[in-house]
Structure formats: structure tokens, C-alpha cells
Image (tube, rainbow, N blue to C red):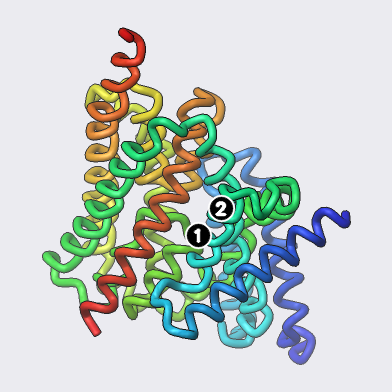
Amino acid sequence: MRPMLQHPVFSIALTFVFYAAAQMLHRRWRALPPIVLACVPIIVFLLLLHEPYRNYNRGGSVLTWCLGPATVALAVPMYRNSMPLRSSLPRLAMVVLAGALVGMVTAGGTAWLLGAPRDVVMSAVPKSVTTPIAIEVSRQLNGIPQITIAMVIGAGVLGSSVGRSLLKVAGVRDDRAIGAAMGTSAHGIGTASLVRHSEMQTTVSSWAMAAAGVFTSLLGTLLAWIMR
Amino acid sequence: MLDLVRGFLLLVGIFLLGTFLHERGVPIPGSVLGLLLLYGALLSGMVKLSWVEKAAGLLLRHMVLLFVPVTVGLIDVGGVVSRSAIAIAASLLVSFLAVLLTTGMLGQRLLARKASAEHLS
């Protein structure tokens, strides 16, 4: 049993199976994102079998590598959604850039003020943006990518559950402003929650999500260079 | 099917090109560099949307699958997380509100005003 469990193909297959099951469960429990539904059983499984993470990750790292091409693929929604936005794109870019900067400073700043160790502070910095880019920025800053992911998911869940109502209270009514806010603060999970409300919001949100990722990565590169 | 293969090859190729340039001294990570290269190539018409559309759609729809292994790695950092749990939770909440509200309110001022100006003209 052991040697089979440790084979890379087994852990890839295991991940596929739990991912598929998570997708099905997610259709029932909308509130829990598939990533939580997929990871919790895998973690329990590994703990029960006393299987170290590093063995699981021999296959897992193959999937992680694919995040590279998936990040490149973000150019497609960014391009497709930039077409209907053409004339307001420069202003939209400014809004998203401001949001990305505010996100990095407030996330890192709050963790630092509360006395978190340096690697945790750095893990918080990219927490607003889409996962593959957030992982990359976290690594550049010597953060802990796992913590970053947990926070990215948290931001997405917050955005999709209370984002629209908070914006309404704050007097934000314009479709483009709502889209920009959701894409910048809650990336893919937030964007997905707009789909059934408004096409314009979704378009702006998709563009903003990719752009926020790019801006955060550029700012993160700058920050990593300064801290060298 | 061939569409998908062509799309994947193109996405992987651009990612590798980005990684190569990164290793040669461009400070931006290879994947984000690849994103920018593909965005530029699409805008300029060098790459047609139809070449990459299907493969990109598939990868993005199932991106969650791709970050399961890293997330499972939370197993190994449980100690750090529980020691900083309050800082992590507070940082998440404060920063989420800050981003949502600045972007939303700035957007309302910059983007909505424009729409009404267009309407008047």
C-alpha cells in the first residue's frame, strides 16, 4: 500500500478525485468554496495515514507548476473584457492600481502592527489578488504561500458574501465601480458572484481582477528589490 | 481537440519564454511576464483569440484544482498560523474593507462621472 501511496501519479489522481467531489458538493453548499471542500478531506486523509506532505507533493508539484500557464491564460479574459471598456480603461486602471496599493499596505501594515512575524506580514501583502499571482508574490517576498492562499480564499469569500451590500451602503451604485471594487478586492470568487447580477459588473470585475494581479506583482517585485 | 492542444502549447510556450526572460534578468516573475506578453500579442493581433481561447478557458475554469496541492501544505505550517491567527484574521478583514471601499468609492467618482458626461454630450 505504502509504495503506491507515495507514487506521484497517486497523489495527482487523489487530488483529481477530491476536486471532482468538491465541485459536486459545492453545488449543494454554495457558501463553501470548492477549494475548502477539496483540501479538508485531503488533509484529513494524509493525517490519518501519517503520510508526510512532502510525499503527497511529489505529484502535487506537477499541478502547482501548471499555475504558470494558468497565469498566462489570465491575459485572455483581460483582453476579451478590455474591448467593451476601451474608453474608460485608463481611468479604470488608475482605480485598480490605487486599490492594489491600498490592499498591500493595509494587509501588511495590520499584520505588522499586531506583532506578526516578518514572514507572516509578507504572506499577507498579496492577499487581495488571484491565487497563482498571490503565491508568486508571496514567494518573492519570502512569505509563506500557504498562509497567503488561506487569506486569498478568505478575501474571496468575504467579497462574494458581503461585498455588494457593503458597496451599496457606501453609496457605490455605478456598475463599473462595483465591478472594479469586487475584482480588485475579491478576485475570481468575487467576480463569479456578480455573474447573475450584471454583465457590465462582471466584465469590469474580470478585467480588474487580472489587472490587480499584474499591478500587485509589479509592486511586489519593486518591494522585493527594495528589501534586498 | 486540436484547438486545445495548440492553445496549451502556446500558453506553456509563452510561460517558458517568460521564465527564460526572468532568468535572464527581467525582475517580473515569468508567469506574469507571460501574461503581459500574451496580452500584448492579443492586442497587436500577433496571436488570435481563437488560438488560445479554449485552452485558457479550461485552465481558468479549473484553476482551483491547480492550487489544491499548495493549499494542502497548510498541514506543515499549522503552528505558525495558530500563533498569528489574530493578526492574520485582522489583516484580512481590515485590508478587504480598505480595498473594497477605496476602489468602489474612487471608481464611483472617476468612472460614473464619465458616464454622465457622455450622457450629456
Instruction: In the rendered view, tell whether residue A220 sits above or below residue B56.
Output: below
- Answer whether residue A54 is visible to the viewer in this image: yes
Q: Residue at x 23, y 32 (%)?
A: B105
Q: CA distance from mark 1 to mark 2?
A: 7 Å
> Relative to the observer, which residue lies in front, A179 or B62?
A179
> Relative to the observer, which residue lies in front, A103 or B44?
B44
- Answer whether residue A21 is visible to the viewer in this image: no
Q: Residue at x 37, y 43 (%)?
A: A158
- The three-letter amino acid code for the residue at tag 1 is Leu
Q: Secondary structure at mark 2?
A: helix
Q: Residue furthest bottom?
A: A3
Q: Residue at x 51, y 33 (%)?
A: A203
Question: Which residue in the protein does label 2 denote?
Answer: A75
Quarter occupied by residue A6: bottom right
Crowding at mark 2 (Cα within 10 Å: few <14, some 14-19, many 20+): many
Task: Please provide percent x and percent y for residue B6.
Answer: 80, 60
> Relative to the observer, which residue lies in front, A43 or B92?
B92
Which numbered marker is on residue B36?
1
Q: Residue furthest right?
A: B1
